Amino acid sequence: MIAVNIYYSGTNGSARKFAQEMMESGTVQKIREEQGNIRYEYFYPVDDEETVLLIDCWENQEAIDVHHASEMMNVILTLRKKYDLHMKVDRFTSDEIPQEDQGFIQK
């Protein structure tokens, strides 16, 4: 799995408006239905009202490539421009949780 954390930042609540429009327009649901998508969720940092975190997870790079070539990317790019957002991106690949760490996870 590949997880991409995207921090969208703007001014005057624009990042939250962007996320809201993504949800209300049905774009998020369409992305979640794309082949290979595992997770697509927005979160709001407690200490930063001008940033929204997107956790975007895919089965593999091929699924990401198909997503990037899809019509959904045009919608996202248009909305990013509309809300004048800036981005910081972190990318991670999955790994099994070591046995030593299992005891620290409350289920």
Image (cartoon, rainbow, N blue to C red):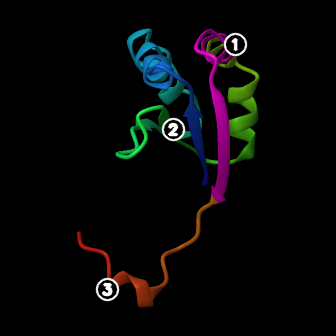
Going by the numbered disc 1, the residue's amino acid type is Asn
Label pair 2/1, CB-CB below 8 angstroms: no
Residue beneath disc 1: 74
Q: Of circles 2 and 1, which is in front? A: 2
**Contact (Cβ within 8 Å) of mark 3 with mark 1:** no
Sequence-wise first label, 3 or 1: 1
The residues tagged by marks 2 and 1 sit, at their Cα atoms, a distance apart of 17 Å
**Mark earlier in primary sequence (2, 1):** 2
Coordinates of residue 53 in the picture (x, y in percent):
49, 40
Say which residue appears at 69% left-offset and 13% top-offset.
74
Disc number for residue 54: 2
Q: Residue at x 58, y 14 (%)?
A: 83
Q: Residue furthest front?
A: 12
10 Å neighbourhood of mark 1: few (<14), some, or many (≥20)?
A: few
* Separation of residues labelled 3 and 1 (CA atoms): 44 Å
Judge whether residue 12 is colored magenta. Answer: no
Of all residues, the one furthest to the left in this rendering is 107
Q: Helix or strand or loop: what does disc 1 sit on? A: helix
Q: Is residue 30 above or below residue 38?
A: above
Contact (CB < 8 A) between labels 2 and 3?
no
Q: Residues within 10 Å of mark 2 (few under 14, many from 20)?
A: some
- Dot 2 lies on which element? strand
From the top left corner, tell me how far across and down residue 19 is, in percent: 46, 23
Q: Amino acid at mark 3?
A: Gly
Q: Determine whether 25 is above or below 107 in the image.
A: above
Residue 89 lies within the magenta run? yes
Q: What stretch of residues is rendered in magenta?
A: 77-92
Q: Amino acid at mark 2?
A: Leu
Q: Quadrant of residue 78?
A: top right
Which mark identifies residue 103? 3
- Left or right: 66 with respect to 107? right
In the picture provided, is 20 more to the left or to the right than 15? left
